Amino acid sequence: MKQKQPIVTYSLLAIQVIVWLLMTWLGGSERADILVLFGAKVNALIAAGQYWRLLTPIFIHIDFTHLLFNSITLYYLGPMVERIVGHWRFLAIYLLSGLMGNLMSYQFSAAISAGASTALFGLFAFFIVKAYMHPNNPYYEALGRTYKTLIAMNIVLNLMASNVDIAGHLGGALGGLLSSFIFAQKQNEVKIWQIVLALAVYVAIVYFILAKAGIYQLLF
C-alpha cells in the first residue's frame, strides 16, 4: 500500500462539513427547503433538468448524526482506498458510486434524499472487488469478507428502517463494484474485457434510467 497523504479524502470531508455548517447557519440541515436549496435529490427537479442533483447529494447531510457517522466512515475508509489506487482514481470511484446510488434512488424512491452513504457503499464494494482480484492475498481477503458482511447487515437494517434509502445504498455498492473494475490500479489486476464490460454495464444502467425518465438528452 503506497504511503500517500489522502488529500482527496480530507478535501471531501472538509466540503461536507462546510456544507453542513452553511445549511445550519441558514436555518437547519433538516429543513426541506434548505435541503432542496443545497442540492438534495428531488426527483421532480432532476426530471425538470437539474441533473447536478445526481451528484450534489453526496456532500449534503440531514442532521449532525448523519454527518458524524458518514464522516467517521469516510475518515477511516477513504485513506485506505486512496492510498491503494491514488488520488484521482479514488475520486472517480467515490463519485461514480455516489452517482449510481443517486440514480437508483431516483429510479426506485420518490423521497428527498441526501448523504455520502451512496459513495461510501461504493468504497465497501471496492474491497470486495480487490478480494476477487487477489484471491491469495490475506489482507484483501479479510477486508472483502468484512465488507460483504457489512453490506448484508446494512441491507437487513435498511429493510427495517423506513427513513433509509436502500435503493441508494445498493446502487452505491453496484457503482463501486463496476467503477473498481474500470479504475483498477494495475492492468494486470483485471483483463481488458472485464474493464470494457464494467464500463458498458455502468453506461447501460445510466442510459436506461435516464431514457426511461425521459431525460436521456443528458447523455448527448
Image (cartoon, grey):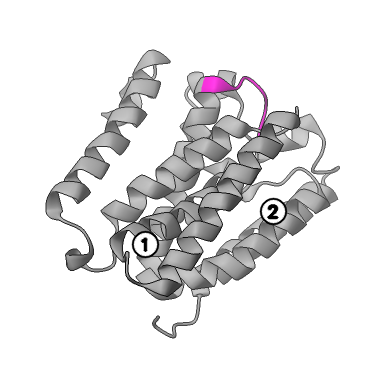
| Residue denoted by label 2 | 19
Quarter of the image where one finds residue 34:
top right
Residue at figure coordinates x 57%, y 39% from the top left? 169
Compared to residue 82, the image places residue 48 above or below, namely above
Q: Is residue 110 magenta?
A: yes
Quadrant of residue 108 within the rendered picture: top right
Q: Which residues are magenta?
A: 108-113
Disc 1 to disc 2, how far (Cα)? 32 Å
Which quadrant does the C terminus fall into? top left
Q: Is residue 148 above or below residue 185?
A: above
Give neighbour class at mark 2: few <14, some 14-19, many 20+ (Cα, 10 Å): some
Looking at the image, which is closer to me, 181 or 159?
Answer: 159
- Name the kind of residue labelled 2 in the image: Val
Expressed as whole percent of the image width and height from the top left, the position of residue 133 reads: 29, 61
Residue 190 numbered tag:
none
The residue pinned by badge 1 equals 130
Determine the main secondary structure of the stretch shown in magenta. Answer: loop
Q: Residue at x 40, y 80 (%)?
A: 1
- Which residue is drawn at the image coordinates 31% and 26% (left, top)? 207
- In this picture, is 131 found above or below 163? below
Q: Find residue 155 and report its horizontal and vertical position in percent.
A: 62, 38
- Asked which secondary structure carries label 1, the reply is helix
Q: Earlier in the sequence, mark 1 or mark 2?
A: 2
User: As shown in the figure, which amino acid type bears the numbered disc 1?
Assistant: Lys
Identify which residue, 69 or 51, lies in the foreground: 69
Q: Residue at x 20, y 48 (%)?
A: 194
Question: On the rendered structure, is 187 left or right of 64?
Answer: left
Q: Is residue 83 visible?
A: yes
Q: Position of residue 28 (x, y in %)?
A: 84, 43
